[in-house]
């Protein structure tokens, strides 16, 4: 992944992972109630200046769940 500066303050970003067992899970509003299976965030980047965090999930996995 490119080492892009923080979108909020321009600071240095640090890349890591998030825990899947206790981590952040995403459900798209496009998912119908029958298919509200969570997609876990698997990677994270954090700004070392302001603490802004970006989370990344498996986009292919999510597209399947929302029929894209
Ligand atoms: Zn920042």
Image (spheres, rainbow, N blue to C red):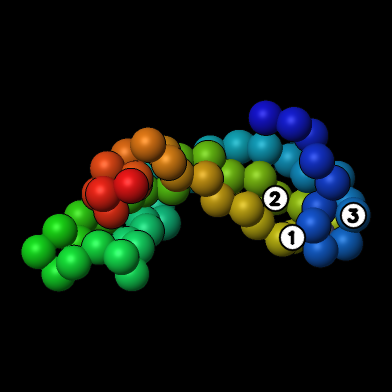
Judged from this view, the residue extending furthest toward the front is 68
Circle 1: element type: loop
The verdict on label 3 being within 8 Å of ligand 1 is yes
Q: Position of residue 39 (x, y in %)?
A: 32, 50
Seen from the viewer's position, the closer of residues 2 and 29 is 29
Image disc number at residue 10: 3
Q: Nearer the viewer, mark 3 or mark 2?
A: 3
Mark 1–mark 3 Cα distance, whole angstroms, equals 11 Å
The dot on residue 22 is none
Q: Which mark is residue 51?
A: 1
Q: Which residue is denoted by mark 2 in the rendering?
A: 46
Q: With 12 as the anchor, is 38 left or right in this view? A: left
Q: Is residue 7 visible?
A: yes
Mark 3 residue element? loop
Left or right relative to 22: residue 31: left
In this view of the protein, can residue 48 be seen by the observer?
no
Q: Is residue 53 above or below residue 41?
A: below
């Amino acid at each position: 992944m490119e080492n892009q500066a923080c979108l909020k303050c321009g600071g240095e970003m640090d890349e890591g992972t998030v825990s899947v067992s206790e981590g952040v899970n995403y459900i798209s509003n496009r998912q119908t109630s029958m298919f509200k299976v969570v997609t876990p965030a698997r990677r994270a980047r954090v700004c070392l200046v302001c603490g802004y965090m970006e989370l990344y999930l498996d986009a292919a996995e999510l597209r399947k769940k929302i029929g894209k």
